[in-house]
Image (cartoon, helix red, strand yellow):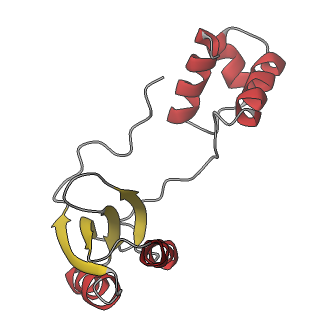
Amino acid sequence: MLDQIDTKLLAALQKNAQLTAQQLGELLHMSPSQAGRRRQRLEAEGHIKCYVARLDAHKLGLRIQGFVQVHLATHGAEHSQGFAQLVDITPEITDAWTMTGDADYLLRVYCADLPDLNRLIQDVLLKHPAVARVHSQIVMDQLKTDGPLPT
């Protein structure tokens, strides 16, 4: 069970994962060692999965962000596992969800340009034997970037 101090600590780390125990202690009105132990406990309990660096896609030359809905022709375990493996090894696919509704999967992709997106769709996704069709949408502008989870 999380208390108010835990939720405040988690909210602070979502904004800046590099906060030191000293900084967390000041924010939480406790000693650095107490704040550090709380963070360690939350990590051990799995509330904090990992710490990552968010990179700037545009500065890396990835000008196209898109979402691709994937519709499978067949839904057997073998095809689903094969498609999941394809998703895992394709670097342009950064996020993937199984969905309810019309599409079976929703993929977030980053590509250098439109020909690169077309190659991903035509030569990678549609070549998979389980894929019947895809529907892509290109992001024009991102109003909120991977916002923090509500705590």
The residue sitting at 81% across, 24% down in the picture is 37
Left or right relative to 9: residue 137: left
Left or right relative to 118: residue 80: right
Q: Position of residue 22 (x, y in %)?
A: 74, 23
Q: Quadrant of residue 45?
A: top right
Q: How many marks?
A: 0
Residue 66's place in the image compared with 114, above or below, is above
Q: Position of residue 30 (x, y in %)?
A: 74, 10
Left or right relative to 98: residue 117: left
Q: Quadrant of residue 72?
A: bottom left
The residue sitting at 49% across, 53% down in the picture is 54
The residue sitting at 31% across, 54% down in the picture is 99
Residue found at the very far right of the displayed protein:
33
Q: Nearer the viewer, residue 22 or 40?
A: 40
Q: Quadrant of residue 1?
A: top right
Q: Position of residue 75 (x, y in %)?
A: 35, 71
The residue sitting at 20% across, 80% down in the picture is 114
Residue found at the very far front of the displayed protein:
76
Q: Position of residue 133 (x, y in %)?
A: 20, 77
Q: Nearer the viewer, residue 142 or 133?
A: 133
